[in-house]
Image (tube, helix red, strand yellow):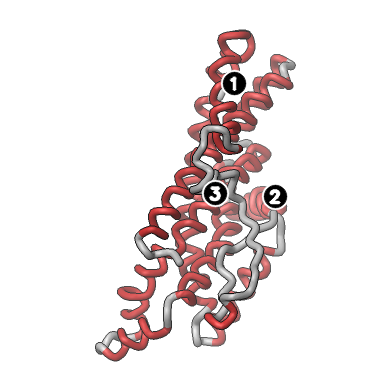
Amino acid sequence: MTKGSPFSGRSQKDSDRTTINVTDGTLIPLRNEGHVISAWNISFFGAVGLLILLPFVSPDPYLRILSFVPDGLMATFAVTIISIFFALIIGLFAGLGRISQNKTINLISTIYVEIIRGIPLLVQLFYIYYALGPILKLQGPPAAILAMSICYGAYMAEIFRAGIQAIPKGQMEAALALGLSRSAAMRRVIIPQTIRVILPPIGNEFIALLKDSSLVSILAVSDLLRRGREYASTSFRYFESYTVIALIYLVMTLFFSRLVAIMEERLRHNGNVH
């Protein structure tokens, strides 16, 4: 799993350099590409149209498949939302540790980030489920949530670190001059500003996590993909089953990518994203 951070942590002097940012976001039409015929519109409305059309053209099996997977869809959202919640908490503390002046805390946080980002998510899922599961008494969804929270917490840590470092140092100096302690200044001044800056990349990570949640199907979690596999294995309708699953994932990721793009545009318009 390859990640790209929208923050480079560079100084203002380097702002004129050309950068290439690779993210997990899907195709979003630019502001000057608002015409009807765009890649996003064709992809999104095409997928929605197929999901509506196929059950009418061929109720068996498409209508049966669509009636078979809703509980898997709910499980996918549950795992994704719970995992992103804990990943944000882990990422916040690890990100603060990455910029901590305490060498021990800084070292521990950096080791966590480097190790976790160096191990594929699938390997982490297997390790926590099969290796640590019997020890920690974790099975199914709890093991999946723990693995995904730990994995994405490392990427969130880098987003928080870069976001905090993007806030002008004068903000901290002004807060200290007003009599706030460093921790109080971080809590009341720096972090609130950081959250506004990092909302778009967090949205991209949510989309990436939503897609990666399909991996939890290997851990006996009845998510969207597993429900599709179950129907395919009993009906032998593999093409139809995986076509529906792929279309549902495509609609979800494109929909949330659009929301992230709208949020980013509004933040930029308000002067919160530069």
Residue 53 in sight from this viewpoint: yes
In the image, is residue 157 above or below residue 26? below
Type of amino acid at the residue the image marks with label 1: Leu
- Closest to the observer: 205 or 125? 205
Labelled disc at residue 50: 1
In the image, is residue 272 above or below residue 189? above
Marker count (numbered)? 3
**Mark 1 burial class by Cα count in 10 Å: few <14, some 14-19, many 20+:** some
Mark 1–mark 2 distance (CA, rounded to whole Å) = 31 Å
Q: In percent of the image, x 67 and y 53: which residue is there?
A: 121
Q: Residue 28 in the image: x percent, y percent?
A: 55, 45
Q: Nearer the viewer, mark 1 or mark 2?
A: 1
In the image, is residue 53 above or below residue 134? above
Mark 1–mark 3 distance (CA, rounded to whole Å) = 32 Å
The residue labelled by disc 3 is 145
Q: In percent of the image, x 48 and y 49: which residue is there?
A: 261
Q: Residue 231 in the image: x percent, y percent?
A: 65, 20
Left or right for 180, reference 253: left
Q: Earlier in the sequence, mark 1 or mark 2?
A: 1
Secondary structure, mark 1, is helix
Type of amino acid at the residue the image marks with label 3: Ile
The residue labelled by disc 2 is 122
